[in-house]
Image: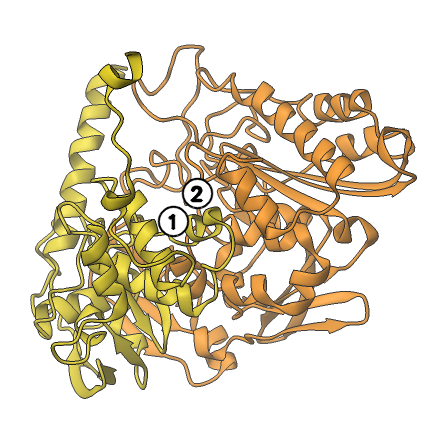
Amino acid sequence: MDFDSELKRRGFLKNVAVATAASSLPGTLAAGQDSNVTTSATTEQSKIGVSISINAQPRQLEIDPRTTLLDLLRENEGLTGTKKGCDHGACGACTVHIDGKRVLSCLTLAATLDGKSVTTIEGVSSGETLHPMQEAFLRCDAYQCGYCTPGQIMSAIACIDEGHTNGDVEEAREWMSGNLCRCSAYPNILAAVRQVAGETPPADPAELATVISLRETLS
Amino acid sequence: MIPFEFVSASSLDQAISSVDHGSSMALAGGTTMLDLMKLNVLTPNRLVHVKDLLDPSVRLDGETLVIGAGCTMADLADNANVVDKLPALRQSLILAASPQIRNMATIGGNLLQRTRSTYFRHRDMPDDAVVLSDGEDPFGTGVDTSCLAVLGNGGRLVGTYPGDLAVALVAFDAAITLQSAVGTRSVAVREFYQLPDDASQYTTVMQPHELITSIELPITATLRNSFYLKVRERSSYAFALASAVVGLDLDGQGASAKITAANVGLGGLGSTPWHSPDAEKALIGQPATDATFESAADAALAEANPPVGLEFKVPLAKRVIVRALKTLRDQGPLSDQQLWAMQHGRG
């Protein structure tokens, strides 16, 4: 067998599968769109009624059962602060709080949330007053492209509530490890978390850096 | 995701009667289920939400820890009995997945997670797919084969069992309670997972219309003095390349101590969560020397049959076992702080 070509075919099909899943947004009927998949499930989706508190606002919603909390927030509620990174629980960009606990909204079906309270990045500030963690991320320049930042901040707030930031620096690093940053802003993210936890004084980490000139060192 | 009917079952009995683990599947924490449904690997017609019906409690019944199937990984890890008395159990939980996932995933679902071998969880690969190795790299070059089993593979290419908790459960001989319409039955975790004789990943003895309701873990001297060492490609939030759970009951101190009881399990290597009675046999009755530990590691990997490209896993696994045993002998059970320092390169 020609394994290389087989491999490419599989890789291609997998990408198609991911694209198909991502296009199955609420309100669209995906049944029959993907000819590779057959199902005896009803093609006419019955909507499910749920009542969810989103950022302290009670919401009565009629949703397709396939709707993830992430898609509900972004597509139905217009709360686009919560980001879709991998959509498979591997990156943490979609982190929100449900009843005060940090979870992944991409792997949570909205239909399971009847009676629950959801807090997103839009719900952590008080009007124009930023949450201390948002202030710390600004102060520490704890991002580069900013895509993972809402998830990082939601995780960081929970991390402090859980009491996982008061030990050695490795402890905070470990308990923030569910949020990937492909710009690798980790040192400054960690600085922001430690500052809000009260482990280090509030300061821009860049101010604390010492620049050593090679010329001075050699002379 | 293909359309499905979503049902919130009103009672556990109703859930049991409607879940067949095929066209009608149970949804608890959803961390594996939703992932695989988005990939169309799992395409149930009906999803039965059972999380609120499963027992979320953890309690001590004499010298047995009884874990409700609905308890989350985070809640089990933070249970006072687990924090105080059961180091390897806590470590197998807090070294797994991420804090967010541990807040969602239930213990029942955790035990049933599928292999992470992307090849065998691809939707074009049927459950019973068999790929025979003919000595050439069967996947072509550049493909990550690190999730293929080197133990319990029957000479074929099969996926590893990916979890951490189940490795501790097989090592310390826990039991799973399964409930059906006719009552409950108890199955040793060591018997629960079946080698994939003609399939590409493990199967279990769980039947249609049965649900996991609890796990019973006996608290032994070896479990109280235990350690879970996990080696991965990055320091956190990754599946094990190789992991070892070890428990020792020692009479004496240091290398001259006599090993009176031992438990050994391996993760990231077997097609099922791997219990090694051969390693335990090599330890029990012997002095806790480095040489004893090395012979136990050799015994644990004696049957290893690595596919092409995975030969590195055999010495890696041996070193993980030896390091885990030495660490336990020399330092005793590790605190979380010691664990994080080790994981992040300080210890």
Q: Chain of mark 1?
A: A
Q: Residue at x 71, y 47 (%)?
A: B333
Q: Amino acid at mark 2?
A: Ser
Whether residue A40 is visible here, answered yes or no, is: no
Q: Residues within 10 Å of mark 2 (few under 14, many from 20)?
A: many
**x and y, in percent, of residue B146 in the image:** 43, 28
Mark 1 to mark 2 CA distance (whole Å): 6 Å
Q: Split into 4 quadrants, where in the image is the N terminus of chain A?
A: top left
Disc 1 and disc 2 in contact, CB within 8 angstroms: yes
Q: Amino acid at mark 1?
A: Ser
SS class, disc 1: loop
Which residue in the protein does label 1 denote? A177
Numbered label attached to residue B236:
2
Q: Which residue corresponds to the image point at 56% horizontal and 68% vertical from the top-left?
A: B69
Q: Please tell me which residue lies in front, A43 or B236.
A: B236
Task: Give the chain coloured yellow.
Answer: A
Residue B235 pos. (x, y %): 44, 38
Secondary element type, mark 2: loop
| Horizontal side of residue B53 vs A12, given as left or right | right
Host chain of mark 2: B
Residue at 11 percent of width and 77 percent of height: A128
Question: Residue B243 location in percent, x, y?
Answer: 58, 36
Residue A136 is situated, as x and y percent measured from the top left of the image, at: 25, 60
Q: Quick check: B91 above or below B48?
A: above
Q: Looking at the image, which residue is at 15% across and 33% down?
A: A12
Give the answer, above or below, for where B338 lies relative to B257.
below
Which residue sits furthest front? A219
Q: Which chain is orange?
A: B
Does residue A36 sit above or below B137 in this rendering?
below
